[in-house]
Amino acid sequence: MGNNGRTSAGDVQVMSAGSGVLHAEHNLEPGPTTLFQIWIEPDRLGGQPSWGAREFPKSARTGQWSILASGKGDPDALAIRADARVIGATLDEGQELSYKPEPRRHIYFALAVGALAVNGRRVNARDGVAIKDEPRLVFKAFEAPVEIVLTDTQ
């Protein structure tokens, strides 16, 4: 598709292989890089390949959820071809944030940095947690900042 770009801290990039793509990633920074690569199964096969990237400043998601990528037509989110949302939030120490999934949804979240409790259970940086059939999630930050990336899928 001819896309070439740099993904900086906090940026989000989406790609759909569709009918097929040639893809390569390289860390051109002088040191190691840390990222989350989240794979979501599409709701339909084939179609045109697509790619998109966008900055999502931390300040815009401090203490609140920000929809980063969505297959539900959310404005300002990067489009994906799945019944899913990828959302992010940043919390300061002691700050709480809740999330109420719809019934029968699958939740996966990971922390880029920090430590928190979700429904009273501790989660540390780089941990990943899968949740199903939980009516409400309450995230409380132990240390600042906490950066959460949450995926909500069917």
Image: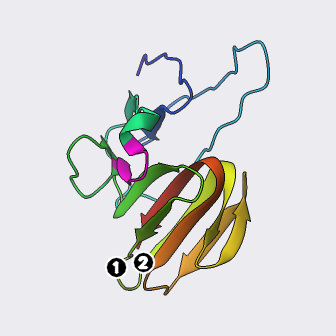
User: Which residue is located at x 68 percent, y 21 percent?
Assistant: 26
* Element marked by disc 2: loop
Judged left or right of residue 125, residue 47 is left
- Left or right, 4 with reference to 114: left
Classify mark 1: helix, strand or loop: loop
Residue 90 drawn at (x, y percent): 50, 47
Q: Which residue is located at x 57 percent, y 61 percent?
A: 109
Q: What is the x, y in percent for residue 104?
A: 41, 84
Which stretch is magenta? 61-69
Residue under the image location 70 percent in, 35 percent down: 34
**Amino acid type assigned to the residue bearing label 1 in the image:** Glu
- Residue 88 located within the stretch drawn in magenta: no
119 versus 24 height, above or below: below
Residue 26 in view, yes or no: yes
Residue 4, percent from left and from top: 48, 16
Q: Which residue is mark 1?
A: 102
Residue carrying label 2: 105
